[in-house]
Image (cartoon, rainbow, N blue to C red):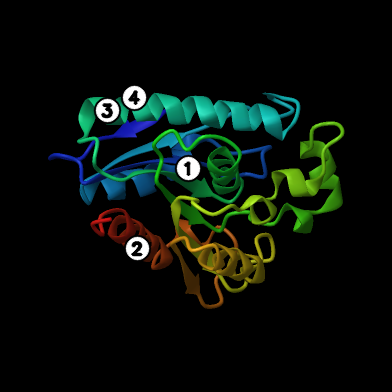
Amino acid sequence: MLLFEPAGPPRAAVVLFHGGGLRHGSPEELTPHCTALAAEGILAAAAGYRLLGQGADHIGDCLADVRTEMAKFQAEFHNLAAPTLPLATGGSSAGGHLALLATLTGPHSGFDTLVLFNPIVDATLVAPEALTRALEPGTTAESISPLHLLRPGSPRTALFSGTADTIAPIESLRAFRDAMLGAGDVCELTEFEGAEHAFHYQEPCFGQVVAGTAGFLTRGW
């Protein structure tokens, strides 16, 4: 885990998980995001997990690592920030998917906020060959699909996605937002017209996503 502390007292805290389809990626990919968030007064961390074919046999192994990293970050949060501040998790693409699963399929453990960059929210739309590699034996796409696992009382959520994303289609993000709102929960979707998957690594979208994330985390919930 890579930890980025703000210069002054934290205004909120977030641990982000990288994307890469569960087969690629590293925490360093989110270093720019965390550096920028720390400059906005956010205690930020970039974290990783075992990858498929590199220590993980299925998505359950990846998810177990995400839960472990979230617990580690929560300990840092208690040491460095006031307990009443927002405590968030999230990430990009597959990392956002894992962060969502960690909060939807187990106790929130104090995490009250999610910030997600082009996350996979409907696993039934994942290409069959990729889905087969990720699933535990005997499980289905619905069992790892946040849209199908939503329940009332989910953490407040900020979604950032491009309208031209073919990996995490904007229609799935809209359906997820609508389902959360229908359950009485807080969910905001910021759409970037014409942007494709992983849009948030480049300007001007990078700065806009960082500003939107910081604003959501420090709104005064």
* Amino acid at dot 1: Glu
Q: Which residue is mark 1?
A: 29
Q: Which residue is mark 3?
A: 78
Closer to the chain start, of discs 1 and 4, is: 1
Q: Which residue is mark 4?
A: 75
Closer to the chain start, of discs 2 and 4, is: 4
Describe residue 81's horizontal placement relative to residue 63 as left or right. left
The single residue placed furthest to the top in the displayed view is: 55
In terms of secondary structure, where does tag 3 sit?
helix
Residue count near mark 2 (Cα–Cα under 10 Å), binned few <14, some 14–19, many ≥20? some
* Residue 51 visible, this angle: no
In terms of secondary structure, where does tag 4 sit?
helix
In terms of secondary structure, where does tag 1 sit?
helix
Q: Nearer the viewer, mark 1 or mark 2?
A: 2
Q: What is the C-alpha distance between the residues marked 1 and 2? A: 19 Å
Residue for point 33% across, 31% down: 3
The single residue placed furthest to the left in the displayed view is: 8
Q: Are marks 2 and 4 in contact (CB under 8 Å)?
A: no
Residue in front for this viewpoint, 221 or 34: 221
- Residue 169, position as x, y percentages in the image: 66, 66
The single residue placed furthest to the bottom in the displayed view is: 193
* Residue 199 visible, this angle: yes
Q: Are marks 1 and 3 in contact (CB under 8 Å)?
A: no
Instruction: Determine which quarter of the picture holds residue 147.
Output: bottom right
Q: Nearer the viewer, mark 2 or mark 3?
A: 3
Describe residue 220's horizontal placement relative to residue 54 as left or right. left
Instruction: Say which quadrant the C terminus sits in.
Output: bottom left
